[in-house]
Amino acid sequence: MEDSKIIKEINVYAVATDPVYMGTGGYTIGRVDNTIVRDPTTKIPKIPGSSLAGTWRYYVALKLFGFWKEKIEKLKEEDEKFNEFKEKLKGIGEIEDTKIDSLNKDELKTTSLKDFLLSLFEELGLKIEKNGNKKNGKLEKQKKIFEKLYEVFNSELENKWFAFEGNRYAGIKCAGQDDKPNIDYESAKDEKTGHCGRCIVCKAFGFSKKDVSWQGLVYFSDLNILFFPVYTRFGVKWITSKRILEDAGIKCNDAPKNNDEVLTKKGDEEHINLGWLYLKVRNSHNLNDNAIPKIDGIEIKAEDIIIVPDDLISQIINSNLEVRTSVSIDPITGTAKEGALFTSEAIPRGTIFYGKIRIFDKKPFEEINDDKTNKLKPLPTFKMIKDALKDSKIFFETLGIGGMTTRGFGRLKIELFDEN
Ligand SMILES: [Zn+2]
């Protein structure tokens, strides 16, 4: 049943292991110079889906690039592997054995998968000239060579998304902005820069060329705050509200009745301070430990959660953001610029976010016989895209998201859960 669904949802939970700064482009509100993105209605800070998509696109490309680079370097270094590869190439049967035997390893480039394949095709006399005639079967042979290369490493692969057919055109160029959107789709695959339009990155995240525009197969919601850390006299507690819990699909039977009340797990503290706010503890909430997602070993206990009124949560979050003062450094003198003191606000470390990823499984539509679909064949499967996201999320833990990542901001741990 599940598998027949066209749109599949993945729940995303994330915990900020650094303060997270998602800038609005720097205008001043009150005392803060560098403000962050907020939901227009609730005024609660968030990580916009567009930022998440852009960053994740880059990390999938990085993962893919790193994977193949490592594999082809290994192939070139290890004679045993290289001989295995040559035997596989002979198995194709359409390339002369003598050509394969006389392959000179030193001529093969390892700077990227694409460079490797191009140098290999050249050595084997299978290079396709620009505007050349494709009907000579060179393209078919190229495809088969990629499949053989993949077969050599197949046993070392856990996830098949690395081997998606279109990946042989991929490069770091497929991450980030396309600097060549005005060329046509056909010539995009031969360009050194700009989106290739063929690899799993381009097909999953979308691309746009002069004659073909493709929206992509993955949609990212915003990452909204689910639990927000606040300092209290009982230590750090995480606040949330009934509406926020319900938006994340977590059942919550009770909520504070008045705007000066909160619910805690114990319910008998009488009063609690949330930052500078002093609130009455009304009674206990019904959340238990297993209702709260564990994110990569990071676990928040029900006893550390406080449910605050829906009308108050935005105010509490906004008055407990991390505010940092920095100085701009003059790049020439290496000292502080005069009058260059500025403040930035950020979502604090320990904040838990929630969002959704929707993956459009268009694989079954490949059979539709229109021009565009024909051009875009083959499409990656749902599993390939999901695995690509899972395998690349590790980069959020080191490279982070948003601004000021070189100043110790932006790292996130992310956990993905299938819909059920
Ligand atoms: Zn691409």
Image (cartoon, grey):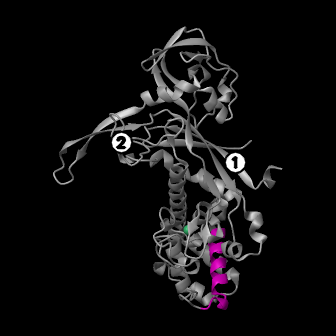
- Some atom of ligand 1 lies within 8 Å of the CB belonging to the residue at label 1: no
In the image, residue 398 lies at what x, y percent?
46, 47
Q: Work out whether mark 1 precedes mark 2 in sequence or the reverse, and give the earlier one.
A: 1
Q: Residue at left 46%, top 47%? A: 400
Residue 249 in magenta? Answer: no
Q: Nearer the viewer, mark 1 or mark 2?
A: 2
Magenta span: predominant SS is helix
> Bounds of the magenta span?
133-151
Disc 2 crowd, CA 10 A, few/some/many (<14, 14-19, 20+): many
Residue 320 seen by the camera: no
Q: Nearer the viewer, residue 409 or 88?
A: 409
Q: Residue at left 46%, top 72%? A: 193
Marking on residue 334: none
Q: Where does label 1 land, which residue? A: 9
In the image, residue 407 lies at what x, y percent?
35, 44
Residue 211 seen by the camera: yes
Q: Where does label 2 land, which residue? A: 34
Quadrant assignment, res 169: bottom right
